[in-house]
Amino acid sequence: MPAKISGSFVFSTLAAVLLAACYDMPLIPDDSLAAGAAGHGHAGAGASAGAGATAAGGASASSGASPTDGGSKPNGGGGASAGGGGKSAGMAGTTGQAGSSGAQHVTWLELNGSTAPSSVASNAALGIEGSFYAYGDGCSELNWDDANRCASGRLCAPELSPDNWGIAIGFDFRNTGPEGTPPNTKRTWDPNDFAARGVAWQVRGTAPKLQVWVLNMASSWQGQCNAMACEISGPPDGVAPAALNGELRFDNMIKDTWGSGIEYTFDPSAVHALQFKIAAVKVGSVAFDFCIDALGIVR
């Protein structure tokens, strides 16, 4: 393991080991996870899943490198200076073109640190009260800069343990937050209610073989979940690998592969979160250092 980067780390564990998942561990508990477990929806609190999962806090040393995968940046911004880990003021909340194809209209969310508050009219018009958080397995080094949405660290070698699945940054579309009623509660978000055709993002830095997945909430939660993870116990839909500047259409997603034999049909009415993942089984023990500068809705 590399030397630990200073910062505040919060450790949480879920005993969820799925049969035959091998090294690419699922990031979700069994569908039978009891309601009432500790929530993670507020900014920086994080979520964890898979055996030995860890939610992270602390500072990130961002590279500040500009993405090379093409696509226009919201408001023309390129992010923060090298090593700063921050983003340009006013970057999100504007409209632009989708990063990968440029063919769709994108409404960029207005971000305040790791939240996309519904107090902003453009976010509210999309039904979004969002929050970002970082989580990983119990072995990987993971530092999370909550204010700038930056993650850095190193993955553990997957051959050392089947629990070494990697790290991820999550985004809840609707989360009541620590002051909500009930607090820190995830709720489903149906893209069809807002004529949303997909999502777009701007990521800066080093994110080896980045993956982006759309998570369906397990039906047992009945659309409202205050546990650390609420997903269906099966491979999610999305894209891997994903461009640093990219978009994902909801009608053009692929299914992740775990080898578990557990499948489900994607349900737009059950969407509750996104997952930006780096899987150890795909890249091995590598370093990562990236920031999510912008997130948008394709319409």
Image (cartoon, rainbow, N blue to C red):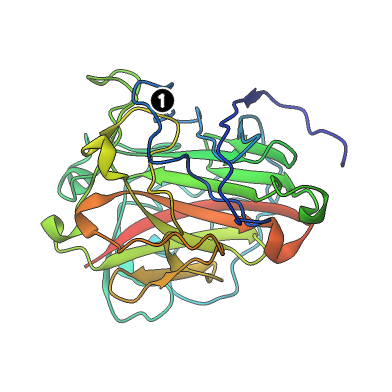
Q: Which residue is mark 1?
A: 39
Neighbour tally class for label 1: few under 14, some 14-19, many 20 plus, Cα within 10 Å:
many
Report x, y in % for residue 67: 59, 68
Vertical comparison of 287 with 98: above or below? above
Q: Is residue 107 left or right of residue 259?
A: left
The residue under the point 56% across, 64% down is 259
Q: Is residue 120 left or right of residue 296?
A: left
Callout count: 1
The residue under the point 56% across, 76% down is 69
Quarter residue 100 falls in: bottom left
Quarter residue 76 falls in: bottom left
> Does the image show residue 85?
no
Report x, y in % for residue 246: 45, 70
Report x, y in % for residue 294: 43, 54
Q: Is residue 224 left or right of residue 58?
A: left
Quarter residue 15 falls in: top right
**Amino acid, disc 1:** Gly
Report x, y in % for residue 256: 49, 66
